[in-house]
Structure formats: C-alpha cells, structure tokens
Image (cartoon, grey):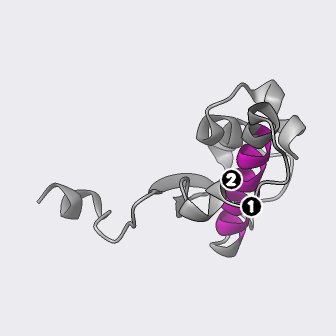
C-alpha cells in the first residue's frame, strides 16, 4: 500500500509530515549542520474557519494565516522542533517577506 511505504497512514485529513530543525540545536549553525526531525503538522483545520474578528475578506485572510502559523509553530514545538521563517513561508504558501506580518 502506498501510504504504508511512506509511513503516513496515521495522518488525519489536513495533516502533513514535514521535517524541521530539532529544538536541541543551538543558534549559529547552518541548516545543513542541524539535526532535522519529522513532524506532523495540521495545515487545514475546520476550526480555522469560524469566529473571525474581521468582516472583510482581506483581513479574514490575514487572520486565517495567523491562526495557521500559530498552530503549526506550536505543533512543531510540542514535537521537539522549530520552524524557520522559510518553513513558515512554504507552509503558508506566501513569500518569506510576508511571514513577519503574520506574527
């Protein structure tokens, strides 16, 4: 079976397997030198869609990305890893220059 080969059969809908830097790695190392750990991150969660504080679509889009950013960063930290700004940009499907805007 395809999923068993990738060891992803345990993933729930909306989740992905993603490799990020282990939390035990110190600052100042290049990413190539860092230990990377596999993480299960929830990119799409039905709870993201409700209770927006903003009425217009542009602000709701920003709020949605902010919710996703916080959730995936917390999930990575709980699993012993940290996401870089490059990781966050890739996962949120945005340019790296936009990531600080969502923090």
Q: Where is residue 85 in the image (x, y as percent from the top left)?
A: 76, 40
For the residues labelled 2 and 1, the Cα–Cα distance comes to 14 Å
Over which residues does the magenta segment extend?
62-77
Q: Residue 68 carries which label?
A: 2
Q: How crowded is mark 2: few (under 14 residues within 10 Å), some or many (20 or more)?
A: many
Q: Is residue 66 magenta?
A: yes
Do labels 2 and 1 touch, CB within 8 Å?
Answer: no
Residue 81 visible to an observer of this rendering: no
Q: Residues within 10 Å of mark 1 (few under 14, many from 20)?
A: few
Q: In this view, does 98 lie above or below 52?
A: above
Left or right: where 83 falls relative to 2: right
Residue 88 tag number: none
Residue 30 vs residue 103, the one in the foreground: 103
Q: Which mark is residue 51?
A: 1
Residue 49 drawn above or below residue 88: below
Quadrant in which the N terminus appears: bottom left
For the point 61% across and 53% down, which residue is it? 20
Which residue shows up at 84% across the image and 46% down it?
54
Magenta segment, prevailing SS (helix, strand or loop): helix
Residue at the spot 16% in from the left edge and 55% down from the top edge: 2
Of the pair 83 and 49, the residue shown nearer to us: 49
Residue at 70%, 62% (x, y): give it.
71
Q: How many marks?
A: 2
Q: What SS does tag 1 mark? A: loop
57 in the magenta segment: no
Where does the image place residue 63, in percent across and percent down from the top left?
A: 79, 47
Q: Which of marks 2 and 1 is in front?
A: 1
Instruction: Identify the element where label 2 is drawn.
Output: helix
Report x, y in % for residue 16.
45, 55
Who comes first in sequence, dot 2 or dot 1?
1
């Amino acid at each position: 079976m395809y999923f068993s080969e990738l060891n992803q059969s345990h993933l729930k809908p909306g989740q992905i397997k993603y490799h990020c830097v282990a939390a035990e790695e110190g600052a100042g190392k290049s990413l190539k030198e860092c230990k990377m750990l596999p993480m299960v991150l929830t990119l799409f969660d039905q709870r993201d869609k409700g209770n927006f504080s903003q009425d217009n679509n542009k602000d709701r889009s920003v709020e949605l990305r902010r919710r996703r950013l916080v959730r995936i960063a917390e999930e990575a930290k709980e699993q012993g890893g940290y996401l870089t700004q490059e990781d966050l940009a890739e996962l949120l499907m945005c340019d790296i220059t936009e990531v600080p805007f969502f923090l």
